[in-house]
Amino acid sequence: MIAFIRGEVWKTGADFVVVDTGDQGVKILCPASSANGMRVGDPVFLHTALVVREDSWTLYGFAEEAQCEMFDLVQTVSGIGPRIALGVVATLSPDEFAHAISSENLHALTSISGIGKKGASRMVLELKDKVMPISAGSLSSAHTRRDQGWRVSVGAGLASLGWTSREAEAAMDSVAQNFPDLIAVSDPDVSDLLKASLRSLDRS
């Protein structure tokens, strides 16, 4: 799996960028907002997800790791493929998406291109135990944004391993209380936080 691409922008389009990695040019599909912000010659680093089909291999890229994880998570919903998942990332931030799912905000979800009311309801049903609830004021401070950011990523990781949202939330509360140094930094290490959460669950 290709986890990231680092290089120089060689070409841009409405929804893609070609990155010169030094010995090859890699075409990466990405949210239009990201593609529009890139210029030829700029250095670039993108978190990536590779989608393999019988007739194609397509690489999708995101500025933030949480966006890449959300892209993968959305595709676990029945009937949703990478194109709609890319639309989800382009429309909602990871925090906004998690809040929409946990609060069953169908209006926010149907604002995404390709998602109707039935699709939004199915998304809530299949993902509600895989995202952590976020308080209404979660976007009010940088500290809270950072805290909820790692919770979305770690919560998704625990859900993929079979833990319920209640178990995951309790584990992350324990980590936040016992390992404040892990989340005090500007860019918390999600892998370390996931390991700490799993250790907490093993002890319970």
Image (spheres, rainbow, N blue to C red):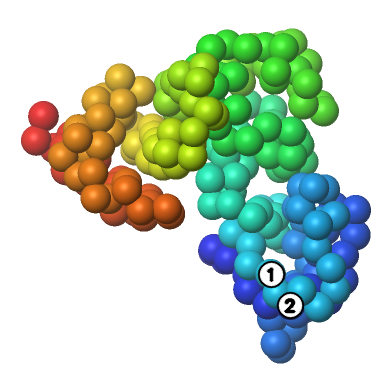
Looking at the image, residue 85 lies above or below residue 169: below
Residue 143 is left or right of residue 176, and the answer is: right
Q: Residues within 10 Å of mark 1 (few under 14, many from 20)?
A: some
**Residue 36, horizontal then vertical, whole percent:** 85, 55
Q: Secondary structure at mark 1?
A: strand
In the orientation shown, which residue stands out farthest toward the right? Answer: 14
The residue lying furthest to the left in this view is: 203
Q: Going by the image, does 50 lie left or right of 36?
A: left
Q: Are marks 2 and 1 in contact (CB under 8 Å)?
A: yes
User: In terms of depth relative to the viewer, which is nearer, 147 or 84?
Assistant: 147
Amino acid of disc 1: Val
SS assignment at label 2:
strand
Asked if residue 140 lies left or right of residue 204, the reply is: right
Q: CA distance from mark 2 to mark 1?
A: 6 Å
x 60%, y 27%: residue: 96
Which residue sits at x=87%, y=65%?
12
Q: Which residue is mark 1?
A: 44
Identity of the amino acid at label 2? Answer: Glu
In this rendered view, identify the residue nearer to me: 194 or 34: 34
Q: Residue at x 68, y 39 (%)?
A: 89
Pick the residue in front: 143 or 57.
143
Callout 2 crowding tier (Cα within 10 Å): few <14, some 14–19, many ≥20: some
- Residue at 49% across, 39% down: 142
Q: Position of residue 197 (x, y in %)?
A: 24, 40
Count how many numbered circles sit on residues in the image.
2
Front residue of 116 and 6 = 6
N-terminal label among 2 and 1: 2
Residue 163: image tag: none
Image mark for residue 8? 2
